[in-house]
Image (tube, rainbow, N blue to C red):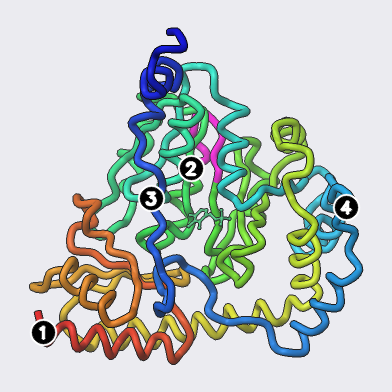
Amino acid sequence: MNQQASVQDWVEQLVRPEIRQINAYHVQPAQNMIKLDAMENPYVWPPQMQQAWLERIASLAFNRYPDPNVSLIREPLSRLLNLPEDQQLVFGNGSDELIQIVMMAMSGSQRGVMSVAPTFVMYDMVSRFVGMPYHSVALNEDFTLDVNRFIEAMQQHQPAIVFIAYPNNPTGNAFSRAQVEQIIEQAPGLVVVDEAYNAFAEDSFIGDIERYPNLVVMRTFSKVGLAAFRLGYMVGHQRWMTEFDKIRLPYNINIATQQGVAFALEHYDVLVEQAASLKQQRTELVAALEATGTCEVYPSQANFITLRLKGVSADKVFTGLKQAGVLIKNLSPTGGLLANCLRVTVGSASENKAFMDAFCKQLKQV
Ligand SMILES: *Cc1c(COP(=O)(O)O)cnc(C)c1O
């Protein structure tokens, strides 16, 4: 390679082929749309709370690096989770960063990463970034898990890390606890239970960390109304967390995030109330969708609902909704088990009504 070579030549020579092959993660433009595509919480803080927050940030020292230990959140959160002495937290710039940290710590051998399909795309993406082989086991047609097939695949591939999103995205269901326990017990490596949707779910594995030496649990504040702050956390035995913490870049959690999430934890009841309201909205939205008689609505323990249209094209309904100003997620292009499926985030009562009105109108038109 010399200075006469084109930029393209340089890039092709130097950037790994598996990186050049990746399609960048695509975020749909959403200006002025009713935004039900990304599992965001529709509610903002009550006015008094917003005012108190503005007063809080007025006195922050933006010229200084943030606290590398994130103590402002670490202490209240450890109490809230009732963590025993030998368990610790590691914070990430979203749980996406934690997924990256875990994989970076364990890449380098031929042992890879395993999960189910369909699931959260970042497990696959990040495994490519770090050069770990990725294997997945297809879910059943109703999105339940064939645990025996999963265990066989673990025996075959010997993954260093298994990711189980619990509840799963983009399907919304939580696999049975007994099945997840079986996976943890049979896994030849670390099992990461990703509880991004825990606020809307019925169960958690945080209490199981004590009895499983190969289990860590991840969560995020993104789905409970704090998506813009980007804060995820991982809970596990301190021996695991000490190693992961070495890879975390020193000041990965900025001062606005530390203060904002700490402030939100002081008003934890507001977060809990909002999640309760969304669960109620979810129940109503499921009933409304089922009443149309046009789709199979899958059980959800998350703040979104996945459905499969019957006799109507998901692509057409998705495009029609978009034209009507309602943005949801079209899962259909993924194909396979997600053929003709749509995913809608549970919003506020008025957003859900706008969605249902537009949805019913589409059904009449297509
Ligand atoms: C949304 C989501 C995450 C990532 O959340 P962050 O915003 O990066 O904290 C992780 N896992 C699953 C399953 C998700 O759906």
Q: Tell which of 60 and 316 is nearer to you.
A: 60
| Nearest-to-viewer mark from 3 and 4 | 4
* Left or right position of 276 against 296: right
Q: Tell which of 187 and 157 is nearer to you.
A: 157
Q: Secondary structure at mark 3?
A: loop
Q: Secondary structure at mark 1?
A: helix
- Pointer 4 residue: 63
Amino acid at the residue labelled 2: Phe
Q: Secondary structure at mark 4?
A: loop
Residue in the image at 81% along x and 43% along y? 86
Residue 14, by quadrant, is: top left
Q: Earlier in the sequence, mark 3 or mark 1?
A: 3
- Pointer 1 residue: 365
Amino acid at the residue labelled 4: Asn
> Crowding near pointer 1: few (<14 within 10 Å), some, many (20+)?
few
**Residue behind label 3 places its C-beta within 8 angstroms of ligand 1:** yes
